[in-house]
């Protein structure tokens, strides 16, 4: 399975967040390392833009020997289409670069479901029950490529998964849920406060021999935000 990490430097709420450090490691590198732990992901590409603000992301990827692709800043959908055509992949998993706690076992679970079910999309956000920052979105490449020509909205070009959720009756979408509803919880990094909490949470994690399960992450996060 191909994993595409969507990243840009010009984040509106926390500019440059993807290269901000969480316990001495850049956010983007933490996301990459989590995806690399997956047993089913064979290739990872960082999808960024040709805008000059994203030169820093490209330099970082080159330094860390991470595959990257540059496309239009706002037409994210077409950016992904180009990647899929260049790599000739039948499917891919989309990962946001603001998710340093994305769990490799959750990624594998989503891919296993996708491999077993004859679906266009496998996700856990339609509706969401997992915490933000634990989002799974796996697409058939052909579905993404064929439907691009039908677009009339720039909004969907920038936020392409929402097109499929809005038009869900036209597609085979499989959603899987967590055992409890933690959709209110945010394990992603969008603000300075999120960054502070992520640093504190990783201090707990670093004391353990291996990356903990999602139940532990949720319990520690609840403890920190009391």
Image (cartoon, rainbow, N blue to C red):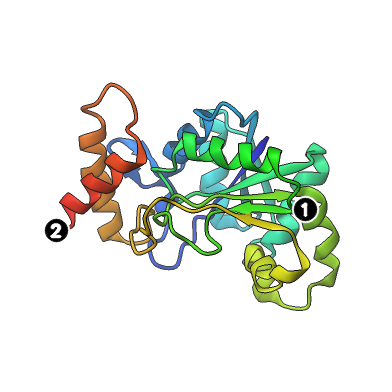
Q: Position of residue 146 (x, y in %)?
A: 85, 59
Q: Position of residue 14 (x, y in %)?
A: 38, 62
Residue at left offset 85%, top offset 67%: 149
Residue at left offset 58%, top offset 42%: 110
Q: Position of residue 51 (x, y in %)?
A: 62, 58
Residue at left offset 21%, top offset 27%: 207
Q: Position of residue 80 (x, y in %)?
A: 71, 52
Visible in this render: residue 114?
yes
Residue 117 is drawn in which quadrant?
top right
Q: Secondary structure at mark 2?
A: loop
Task: Say which of 57 and 28 sits in front.
Answer: 28
Visible in this render: residue 45?
no
Q: Which residue is mark 1?
A: 81
Residue 201 is drawn in which quadrant?
top left
Q: Indicate whether 116 appears above or below 147.
A: above
Q: Which residue is mark 2?
A: 226
Report the number of discs.
Answer: 2
Q: CA distance from mark 2 to mark 1?
A: 43 Å
Q: Residues within 10 Å of mark 1 (few under 14, many from 20)?
A: some
Name the quadrant of the N terminus. top right
Labels 2, 1: front one:
2
Side of 180 where 203 appears, left or right: left
């Amino acid at each position: 399975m191909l994993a595409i990490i969507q990243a840009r430097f010009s984040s509106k709420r926390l500019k440059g967040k993807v290269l901000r450090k969480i316990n001495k490691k850049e956010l983007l590198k933490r996301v990459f390392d989590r995806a690399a732990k997956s047993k089913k992901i064979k290739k990872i590409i960082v999808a960024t833009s040709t805008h000059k603000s994203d030169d820093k992301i490209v330099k970082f990827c080159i330094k860390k020997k991470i595959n990257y692709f540059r496309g239009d800043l706002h037409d994210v959908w077409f950016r992904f289409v180009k990647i899929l055509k260049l790599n000739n992949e039948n499917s891919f998993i989309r990962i946001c670069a603001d998710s340093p706690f994305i769990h490799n076992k959750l990624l594998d679970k989503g891919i296993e479901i996708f491999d077993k079910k004859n679906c266009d999309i496998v996700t856990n956000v339609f509706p969401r029950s997992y915490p933000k920052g634990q989002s799974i979105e796996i697409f058939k490449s052909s579905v993404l490529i064929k439907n691009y020509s039908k677009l009339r909205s720039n909004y969907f070009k920038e936020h392409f998964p929402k097109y499929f959720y809005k038009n869900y009756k036209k597609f085979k979408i499989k959603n899987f849920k967590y055992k409890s509803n933690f959709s209110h919880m945010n394990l992603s990094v969008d603000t300075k406060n999120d960054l502070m909490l992520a640093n504190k949470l990783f201090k707990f994690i670093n004391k353990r021999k291996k990356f903990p399960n999602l139940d532990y992450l949720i319990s520690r996060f609840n403890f920190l935000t009391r």
